[in-house]
Structures are given as C-alpha cells and as structure tokens.
Amino acid sequence: MGNMVYVGIDTGKETFSACALNIEGTELMTPTKYEHGREEYRKFLGNAKAIASVTGGRLLFGIESTGIYHVPLYDYLTKRNYQVRVFNGLELSGMRKSRIRKTKTDAIDARLIAGYLLMCFDKDKRSPLPLELRNLREFCRIKKRLTRNLTRIKNQLIRDLDLIFPGFTGIFSDMLGKSCLELLEEACTPKEIIGMSKEKLRKYVSEKHAVKLKIAAAKTTSVSSFDESVVFEIGSLCRQARCLLDELSGVKKEIDSEYSQIKTPLQSIPCIGPGTGPVILAEIGDVKNFDHPKRIVGFAGIDPVIKESGKSRKECRISKRGSASLRCALYQAAFAGITCNPVIKAFYRKKRSEGKTHRDAVVCCARKLCYIIYSVLSNNRVFYVPSHIIASNAQMSKQG
C-alpha cells in the first residue's frame, strides 16, 4: 500500500472533527474541529496535505454517513479527486461498543473512523457513486418523499371525511384524483352536496356518482360540532395535495429525462420499468462495488436473518438492513415479474410448489432478480431467457 495517511472525519450539522493516522496507527494529526464552509474546507485540506507532504504519504479519507451533513465535504473532496470512503453508522457501531469507556465525543469518533479506515481500506475497493447517477438518485428520493407526504395527506383526508361525511370515501376510488379534490374544495359537507344542483355536480363526477353522493349525503349523520374546523382542514389538505401532485409530476419528468440519457442493459429486463428502473440503477450505482450477487441482496436488506445454535438452524424474516428504496423497488419489480418475466415466473412457480407462501415466494423472486441484475450489469449485456426456461414454460402452458 506504500505510505498512506488515513484521515477520519466525524461530521455534524455545523462542525466536523478530523484525525489522521499513519499505517502503524500513530496519530499524525490530533482530532481538530472545523466549521462547515469553503474556507474551513480549504484550511482542513491544507493541513492534511501538509502532513502528507512531510510523511510522503497519500491521503485517504473516511467519513461517517450522517444524514445529509457529510455531503458538502464529501463533494468538496471527491471533486478534487481524493479517495473518500463513506461508512454506514452500523459499520462503526461495533468498534464503538468494543471500547471499555462509554465516553463519546466528536474527537473520539474522528479517531475511531480513521482507525476503521486503516483496517478496511485495502480490503474495500468500492468506488463512489458515478456523477451521472447522483442526480438520478436524489430525484428518486425526492419522489419517494413527495409520495410519502401525499399518503399522509390522503389518510388525513379520509379521517376528516369519515368524521363529517361518512360514505363519501367509498364513492371515489382515488381520493387524490383531480375531480375529487376539485369537488372537495367546492363542497365537502353533506349539506353542501344536497344544496348543489345535479348539473353543477356533474362537472366533477359522472351521473352515477352524483346520484350516489346525493343518497350518501341524505343518509349521513355527521359530527356537526367539528364542521367548521374539519372543513378548514379539508380545504388546506386539498390545496397541499394539488401542489404536491404538480411537484411529483415535475420530478417524474426529471427522472425520465435523466434515465433516458443513461445507456444501461437494465432496461432490457422485463418487469423493470420506468418506475423501478431508475431507483434500482441509482441505488446500486457501480456494480463493480459488488463481487457477488448476494452482496446486492444484502445491500437491499432482503437477505434472511439466520439463527443457528448447535444442530438448530432457523431462517427468520428478512434483515431490512441497507437501502429501503432499493428493497421496495426490487419487491415491486419481482411482483410484476411473476406475470411478465419468464425467468421470475418459473422461479415463483418453483417456490410455491415447495410450499412457500405468496409473500415469501415474491421475496425469493426479488433475490433472484438481484442475480439477474448483477449478471446483466456486470457483463454489460441484454437480458435473455435461457432455453430450458422457455421449454419449461411452454410445457406448463400446454398442461394448463
């Protein structure tokens, strides 16, 4: 490895602490605190370079992933072509627990990160997320946050309507649909619906739904003491939903634009479409970071938790460690693959015949999909269906 200077960085919201070690684990730079900002970054990097020039070593940086607070410094260093390893907090927790004393400070954490970097850097050849995927991943995560907010609004809207207008929610299949939101902004209480003419009501819903609404409004017994406050909140929720839906539409366009510019064989896999493809590609990043498909399985958190003691061995639930976004996208793609991907379809049938429940079989298919994705990306070739799968599916179709 030659001479190396291992710099551990512990970041917070306003400050970060850094400590440097040599290959023997001797401190070259005592834990020092800096503030976030370009000038402080320049000062920190200058100090690190001065140490490296004295020792004749190459700078290697390790930084703990702390929400978003490590990102500006990480970006500053990678843009200057320095190697930076980002550690998940779970990777460092074992080392923290191994210390006898329970004292935890930024200085101690910075030295601990430097020590962990020293131990694992030569074993870990992971490359950072390619630049073209950084925007895509962030757009996918923005989409996820917007969707989560819309789900919260929908649930609150259903709660409010069940309070003042029981029966309303059973008439609409999509509570966040354009016509439903427009109607709620115009009239959301039974009294308002009864007082609205059929012609006006038909601007928002079909004649069949208009009749159902009138009947539900006539039958309902609402909690009138809450009408004023709940009506106010319904109006507020509708406005929020319309705004978030517009933003979501814009984000989807950005994702489509970014994804269309990336040439990847991932797009050739049936069941991985424009919804799941960008998420899977952005979360996995450089497939060379994984030396085996099971690493992707673990990274997605769909690996089984195994409990073994003596002759007893049990496979429990999935670990749910790693990227939740990737896990969700793989599950959705596997669910779709049961009907549209011949390989996944055959694998699902096999697992069901072994006695797996539908849900467990879909999880198994998600793991299988990780192997397919790994093969396609690492070999840079389009997906194909093996001949024995084609023959098997044809035979099953004849029998069916």
Image (cartoon, rainbow, N blue to C red):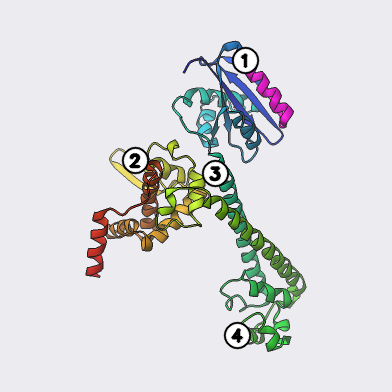
Element carrying mark 1: helix
Element carrying mark 3: helix
What is the distance, in whole Å, between disc 2 and disc 3 at their CAs?
Answer: 39 Å
Marks 1 and 3, the one that precedes in the sequence: 1
- Residue position marked by numbered label 2 in the rendering: 308
Q: What segment carries the magenta color?
A: 32-50
**Magenta-colored stretch includes residue 175:** no
The reply to whether discs 3 and 4 touch (Cβ–Cβ < 8 Å) is: no
What is the distance, in whole Å, between disc 1 and disc 3 at their CAs?
Answer: 34 Å
Between disc 2 and disc 1, the foreground one is 1
Residue 59 lies, with reference to residue 92, above or below; the image says above
Marks 2 and 3, the one that precedes in the sequence: 3
Crowding around mark 4 (Cα neighbors within 10 Å: few <14, some 14 to 19, many 20+) is: some
- Residue position marked by numbered label 4 in the rendering: 212
Between disc 1 and disc 3, the foreground one is 3
Marks 3 and 4, the one that precedes in the sequence: 3
What is the distance, in whole Å, between disc 3 and disc 4 at their CAs?
Answer: 49 Å
Element carrying mark 2: strand
- Residue 67 lies, in percent from the top left, at 62, 41
- Residue position marked by numbered label 1 in the rendering: 51
- Residue position marked by numbered label 3 in the rendering: 133
